[in-house]
Image (cartoon, coloured by chain):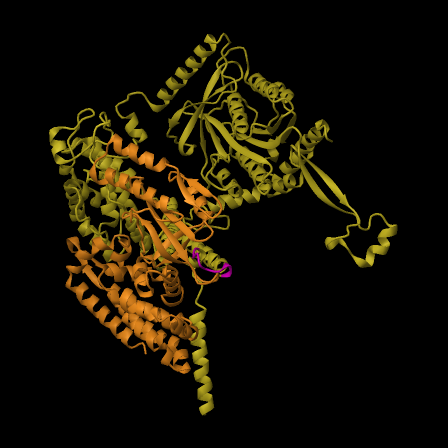
Amino acid sequence: MQQANRQQQWRRRTKRRRERLVRAIRPSDAFRPEASFTTKVAGTAAWKRRSMDTQTAALTRGGTSPGPDFDFTTHVDTSIARTNYPLDAGVEADFGHTALTCYKKVALISLSESYRRKRLADLEQSSVACDLAIYRSAADAVTEAIENRLALSRLAVFGELACCETYRRASAAFQVRPDSVRQIARATLLFGDVLARDPEPHPTTQLLTEAILTASAPFFQRLEEGPVEGDFAFGSEWADAVMASIDPLLPPPPEKRSLTDDEASAGYSLRSDPIDDFLGVQPPFHQKRPPTIDDSPPTAEQLSAGDETSAGDRFKQEAERVAKNLAAQARAAGADFSAHGTASQLGRSEEAGPHQGSPAQAFLVDAGDSSSAAISEGFYDPSLDSAEVRRLAADARPIERIVRDQALPGRRDDLDYLRFRRTGPMIDGKRIDLAMVEDNVFQVSRPIETAHGAGRATLLLLADISGSMSEAPMRALKAVTTAWLRATASNPSLQVLAGAYNTTEGRNRFTWSWNRNLSPQSRAQAHRAVASMPKKGDGGQADAASIRHAVNSAIAVDPKASITLILLSDCGFCKSGSVGGVGPDAEVANTVQEIREELPDRFRFVVTALGRAPNEPVRRAADETVVIPSDELGDFGKIARHISDSALRQVNRSWHKEDPAA
Amino acid sequence: MTRTRRKRPVAQLAEQMDLVDQAVETLLYRAVSAGGLAALSRALEKQVVVWTSRADCTCELRDPESVDNALDMIWSQRWYFGLQMDEFNLPRYLLFRTESEGWHDAEVSVEELFLSPRYSLPDERFATARDFGGRERQVVRLAPYRIGALKLVGRRNPKDADRLLATIGSKILLWTEDQRVVALIARHLGAPELLQAVEVLAFMKRAEHGLLRYRLEEQPAIARFFQDVYPNQALASLLGRLNTLSPTTLSELPDRAEALQRTLADALQRFLGTKIQRHGGIRRTVEELVMANIFRLEMLRPELESSMHFLTARDQLVTTCRSTRSAKG
């Protein structure tokens, strides 16, 4: 009995010691500098599991589910874990930030936008004591902060997303002394309940902080009591209360580039004031300064405020102005005007409609007949609709299998025969005798991929998404693009660009599904952007200018590229330029011919006609034409066979035929 | 920072850092002028010589890589420099030397030749050492206690002082970064007993007591260090009694520490859960306030100390810490 007790005691003690020596692996071990390699690997695995769980929970709370194709690496943030903030809490805070980003992606409250549209319109009619522009700017900051605060509070009540509250505290720890109205609003509304007070703030800063805190106190209390029903109503009420409290403290309309005496005496300053007499002695950096009125860049709406012309009109005017300048420069140099091959960046503008992402860029490109067309460029965001992504991947699978097996354009595949290997796993002692008499016994081969002599291979997938593309051709188009993107994802030596073009609202639009310089997602997830393309085409198109722009972009990515352009279109082309006497097909053919002359032996043009065959000029201009009849557009197996039978083999053959090394 | 020129490999570098720091302070606290900016620019651009065993390396403070390179060339000693940019993008510096007992022991910062008053140390127990390759690591910072260590071993024996500090930093004061929150609470919220108790428990749990018994006989200054230089009476008395403890008692020290740690953790949890009333009747726990202001706890302290709930909770925590320290044996 005594011995049993001793054994039990010994076991208990040993267990305690083991627990002391071997503690559980935590996600923070992935970032711990002193951790061993093994611990770091285990910590990284734990961190990944936790990150996926957090994102799944946030998406679920947002009303969707991640699905098998969801990329769990897109929204991950690890910035706080790499700072001086305590490590465990920092890693938790990063999870909170990741959860917030995921949640806002799928369930954006858009309080600021709604508030601006609905409430500020009414307020403009009523009496606002301060300048209206300043009031708008402050309202933007206030609603944005409230929006984030509500999202964090809503998520933090769930056990698995309590890290959102940790994130809020960590953000508060990194809050520096606010020096503008925007920053004061943000700091006070997001962290006002936990932030230590600055012992000696500037009097104006203190006034604003106190006003916002007093107005927000009941709302903080309400948030503490539990989840809030009706976010928008609650947020609007909160924003109203805060704006009413700070309205008397904000300055009345300022004069041009100077402050009135009242404002100056209230302690405001304009950040854009020029320092004319900088050579003189200025107050020291560390002196407490009054808050600046606004430090945010002007929005597109503010830029257009007071300007009667629309953004599209201004864009056209700007395009004309630049074209005139180019012509004047060319004439001065004694040459004929041509904007051929130029990609002049005209400016930036907010895009809407099929263009996602912002800001977009605008380019002036040659339309092939010595006239030019303006093209504005954007990119598709990766789709979060997992069902659509899955369906697209299923559609593309037969085509993908075909194109994956093909040798890629611009590359030559050879077999390197290895015989009688004396080292490595190829030696088989039992068969050495046989090898002396039989040549093929030990013959093994390995594929060798070598780049084409003319330059690095670039595959340019160009999709026409104009109004003539109905649902079936669009589905086929998306499947073919997806197939190419997925089949080439694991080949880093092949450059792939994929884009779509059309003309809506009088503007030529070019939207990238994948361009390594623009797209936010990883290359392996490029097909998710294709899922964001519209189900049906819309508007007209400028074919020649879009082809020119796509090739210009490919050259910008790699100047020495061997480009294979695969045009996916219903072959109902439209004109880009305004020069008479040239039809749309001839315009496309001329543009292709110009590109050929510019890139001798480095350009191939393949037309994949969805529904009907191209007319004679385009067919002549194309190296290969694949025609998919309209009744076969829904059968992806047949599409795969069409592509396999004609285009790819011939493209490869033509490359190999002209390769001097072959 | 002493302004006298000393025969050190990095003496010129420290002087130049001092010059830059003076120029920056002029801009920050006195006035901004073209002359002040030019002085700062000149100080940053000046070529500084670092004396190494092979050749004299030159570097400029405006190019941190050149400074890292020059410090890396000193083979006889290990010097590191820390560079931080403040909110106005103006530099602040730390120049320090490390020492370690053996090649496998942790490095300890034993001497600081220059420390800008504005240099931010989130946890004053650690300094960040950056290798020439750019890899950063935290080293235990005992340089502030160098003068006390020199008094113990004699001013003519600086190497003994280095050895003493290296031993204490790597074998006795088993500081880890996980103790950062506790250390900050102890330092800034008026509960130094908390850190002392944590140090005693860490020593009881993780130190190599058997080996240390011999070391204490060789270096009696170690025990005196905790009486005179870095006051932690509990640790000093434990070290003093280490030789008299039986092997059984020694082997039971970790288990004893485990039980005491649970008591201390409960007390700390109660302290952190104390609710403080803030502006507008909002109530927040001490933990929330501490984690949201971890880099400016000194700004939080006056507000916390105006709350009776906080003062009571702190007294209870301090009492538990004292009982933990005294119950160690």
Who's the residue at 27% across and 54% down the image? B292
Q: Does residue A540 lie above or below A534 as drawn?
A: above
The image quarter in which residue A242 lies: top left
Looking at the magenta stretch, what is its main secondary structure? loop
- Viewer can see residue B269: no
Please state the horizontal and vertical placement of residue A301, each as a whole percent of the image: 30, 29
Q: Pick out the residue farthest to the front.
A: B156
Of residues B61 and A383, the one drawn nearer to the viewer in this rendering = B61
**Residue B57: % across, % down:** 45, 42
Which quadrant of the figure contains the N terminus of chain A? bottom left
Tell which chain the image draws in yellow.
Answer: A
User: Magenta region: which residues?
Assistant: A31-38
Q: Quadrant of residue A204?
A: top left
Q: Colour of chain B?
A: orange
Depth check, front residue: B130 or B303 = B130
Q: Residue furthest bottom?
A: A1
Q: Position of residue A606 (x, y in %)?
A: 62, 28
Question: Splitting the image into 4 quarters, where does residue B275 fall?
Answer: bottom left
- Whether residue A196 is visible here, answered yes or no, is yes
Q: Which one is nearer the viewer's eye here, A252 or A652?
A: A252
Q: Is residue A409 left or right of residue A371?
A: right
Q: Is residue A279 left or right of residue B258?
A: left
Quarter of the figure that contains the C terminus of chain A: top right
Residue A576 image position (x, y, % from top left): 50, 19
Farthest right residue in view: A437
Q: Please tell me which residue lies in front, A164 or B98.
A: B98
| Magenta stretch holds residue A223 | no
Residue occupying image coordinates x 21% and y 37%: A284
* Numbered label tally: 0
